[in-house]
Image (cartoon, rainbow, N blue to C red):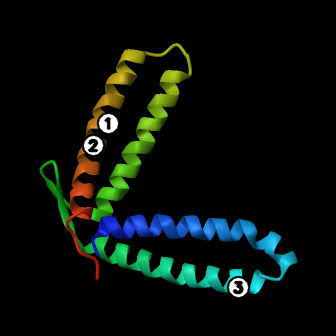
């Protein structure tokens, strides 16, 4: 299975877990609570296996971002950090304070280009790397 497929399956599992957790209090009355709890535990076990497989893959696979070679895990961290910076700049731009909007937009655009590089490299890796 490719990393990208595993990520999609992981999101689907999270959705199922969230849905079952929402119905725990409702099902307590109908008597199906044991079935739901057992299913939740089964899904949590599968989710944990997915997380371990992804962590192992992300730590061991090296990708090229720009002119640097880094692990997918490092690229994910840098991508998330860049996204947080973009969000901060966007909030400042939208705050209507007396600041240099053009400068902030320029900074955000540069960060966005970095974000695109990380996203592209990670995505290419996700669609080409097999997971154990």
Give the x, y percent position of residue 124: 21, 57
Answer few, some or many: residues within 10 Å of disc 2's Cα (few below 14, many 20 plus, some between 14 and 19). some
Mark 1 against mark 3, which lies toward the viewer?
3
Quarter of the rendering occupied by the C terminus: bottom left
Q: Is residue 19 above or below residue 32?
A: above
Secondary element type, mark 1? helix
How far is disc 1 from disc 2 in space, using C-alphas? 6 Å
Q: Nearer the viewer, residue 93 or 34?
A: 34
Q: Residue at x 54, y 67 (%)?
A: 14
> Which residue is at the front of the view, 53 or 15?
15
Which one is earlier in the sequence, the residue at label 2 or at label 3?
A: 3
In this rendering, which labeled residue sits more in front, label 2 or label 3?
3
Q: Which residue shows up at 52% across the image and 70% down it?
A: 13
Residue 34 spot, x, y in % from top left: 75, 86
Q: Secondary structure at mark 3?
A: helix
Q: What residue is pinned by disc 1? A: 112
The answer to whether residue 71 is visible is no
Q: Marks 2/3: CA distance?
A: 44 Å
Question: Rounded to the nearest whole Å, what is the CA distance between mark 1 and mark 3?
Answer: 46 Å
Q: Is residue 120 visible?
A: yes
Asked whether the residues under the numbered discs 1 and 3 touch, taking CB atoms below 8 Å apart as contact, a structural biologist would say no
Residue underneath mark 2: 116
Position of 35 compared to 11: left or right? right
Quadrant the N terminus occupies: bottom left
Residue at 63% in and 65% down: 18
As drawn, 84 above or below 110: below
- The residue carrying mark 3 is 35
Sequence-first disc among 1 and 3? 3
Q: Secondary structure at mark 2?
A: helix
Residue contact at pointers 1 and 2, CB within 8 angstroms: yes
Rendered location of residue 108, percent (x, y): 36, 30
Quarter-of-image position of residue 104? top left
């Amino acid at each position: 299975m490719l990393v990208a497929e595993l990520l999609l399956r992981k999101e689907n599992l999270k959705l199922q877990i969230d849905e079952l957790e929402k119905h725990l209090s409702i099902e307590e009355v109908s008597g199906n609570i044991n079935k739901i709890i057992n299913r939740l535990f089964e899904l949590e076990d599968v989710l944990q296996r997915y997380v371990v497989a992804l962590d192992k893959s992300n730590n061991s696979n090296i990708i090229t971002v720009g002119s640097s070679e880094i692990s997918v895990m490092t690229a994910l961290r840098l991508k998330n950090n860049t996204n947080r910076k973009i969000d901060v700049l966007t909030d400042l731009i939208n705050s209507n304070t007396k600041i240099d909007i053009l400068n902030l937009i320029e900074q955000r655009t540069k960060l966005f280009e970095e974000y695109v590089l990380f996203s592209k490299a990670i995505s290419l890796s996700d669609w080409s790397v097999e997971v154990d």
